[in-house]
Amino acid sequence: MDYGLKISKPGFDVFTAAAKDLAFGSQYDTLKVYASGTGDFTSDFSTNQVDTISHGLSYRPAFVVYSEIHAGFGEPSTGLFYALPHSPPFGIGGSLVTQTIIAGVDASNLYIRLGAEVVLSGRVINYKYVIFLNPALGDDL
């Protein structure tokens, strides 16, 4: 291919670099953003909560979810988001069911779950998500 975008790894000439020496080459199939969005939970210290986001793909796509967890502890919002999963710090222990924020995906939906005991009741926990499309795995949109 004599056209497209190439980015070489440090120390390699982009014009002569072999494929293995590229950080990116548009001639190769890459993940593409299929959907993205935001949401929030209002915590309830007695109930696990799940948000379900339909993606409509017929396979389990790659995804990433970020949470503004630290604003939920009563601190002012910093606008900073942290990649999930979020769980108690090492050494504190805690339940993977009630004390974490996790995300998972199946061939129909993305699921984001806030454990009941992550923060005190009434705290708003914001999240952002990105679902990636890989045309090689499903319908080429």
Image (cartoon, rainbow, N blue to C red):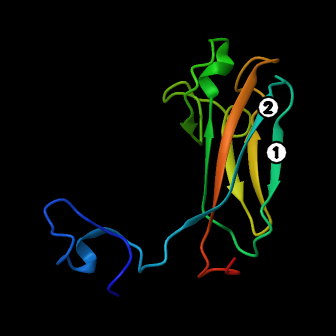
Relative to the observer, which residue lies in front, 55 or 48? Answer: 55
Residue 51 located left or right of residue 3: right
Can you tell which mark lies on residue 51?
1
Check whether the beta carbons of the residues at disc 2 and disc 1 lie within 8 A of each other. Answer: yes
Q: Where, quadrant-wise, is the N terminus in this rendering?
A: bottom left
Residue 48 located left or right of residue 86: right
Q: For mark 2, give the secondary structure.
A: strand
Question: In which image quadrant can residue 32 be found?
Answer: bottom right
Q: Residues within 10 Å of mark 2 (few under 14, many from 20)?
A: some
Residue in view at x 82 percent, y 43 percent: 50
Looking at the rendered structure, the kind of residue marked 1 is: Asp
Residue 40 located left or right of residue 12: right
Relative to the observer, which residue lies in front, 16 or 95? Answer: 16
Residue in view at x 38 percent, y 76 percent: 4
The residues bearing labels 2 and 1 have C-alpha atoms spaced at a distance of 8 Å
Q: Where, quadrant-wise, is the C terminus in this rendering?
A: bottom right
Residue 98 in the image, given as x and y percentages of width and height: 74, 34
Relative to the observer, which residue lies in front, 39 or 4? Answer: 4
Residue 114 located left or right of residue 9: right
- Residue 7, compared with residue 122, is above or below; it is below
- Residue 16, compared with residue 113, is above or below; it is below
Q: Earlier in the sequence, mark 2 or mark 1?
A: 2
Q: For mark 1, give the secondary structure.
A: strand
Looking at the rendered structure, the kind of residue marked 2 is: Phe
Mark 2 lies on residue: 41
